[in-house]
Amino acid sequence: MNHYIRLIIVGLMATLAVYLTACASTAPQAEPIPGTWVDAQVGGDSVTVPVAMVEEYHNLHFDIEYEGSSLAFMAYLLDGRIQVRANACPPCRSRGFTLDGNVLDCDACHTLFDATDGSGIEGACVDYPKAAVPYEVTGGALVMSLADLLDAHNETLRAG
């Protein structure tokens, strides 16, 4: 093959690679993912939710009953990792968040929270960050302790 033709082909391939990289970085973000409510399994001091359901729906919401109250939580996929947080917006009394990229959007007041760390970004209820719940993955399920869930819920109810 002629040396000049080889240089042209290599140059065209390099240009195409740069173009495809630029297009990928400006691709539109996926649609916002509303929460899907599921039933968590409560047994003793443990609460479990199937990992497969988080992977399928990407944004799960679940309740637990504690001393006559229903407490809401969410488990969602973010950058390939599962996050579990309290699912409450105390000032507007909402339970429910849509996952929009790296942002949690309150379904009632539309206050925005960082989905990575739960901190407030902007909106009326920004002073009530969404506390994380530690968990383990055992036998295909997220396993959380009731004490950790209660701690996260109570922390989310306090301004800070």
Image: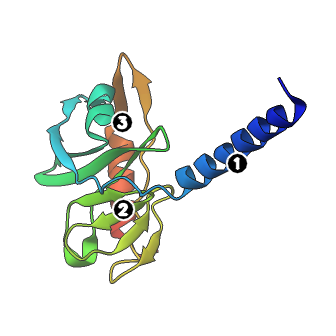
- Give the quarter of the image for residue 154: bottom left
Sequence-first disc among 1 and 2: 1
For the residue pair 3 and 73, the one nearer the viewer reads as 3
Q: CA distance from mark 1 to mark 2?
A: 38 Å
Q: Kindly check if marks 1 and 2 are in contact, taking CB atoms under 8 A apart as contact.
A: no
Q: Secondary structure at mark 2?
A: strand
Identify residue for label 1. Answer: 15
By what rule are the colours in the image chosen? rainbow
Q: Residue furthest left?
A: 68
Sequence-first disc among 3 and 1: 1
Image coordinates of residue 81 in percent, x first then y, are 48, 39
Image coordinates of residue 52 in percent, x first then y, are 30, 26
Identify residue for label 3. Answer: 145
Q: Which label was assigned to residue 104? A: 2
Sequence-first disc among 3 and 2: 2
Q: Residue furthest front?
A: 2
Q: Kindly check if marks 3 and 1 are in contact, taking CB atoms under 8 A apart as contact.
A: no
For the N terminus, which image quadrant? Answer: top right
Q: Secondary structure at mark 1?
A: helix
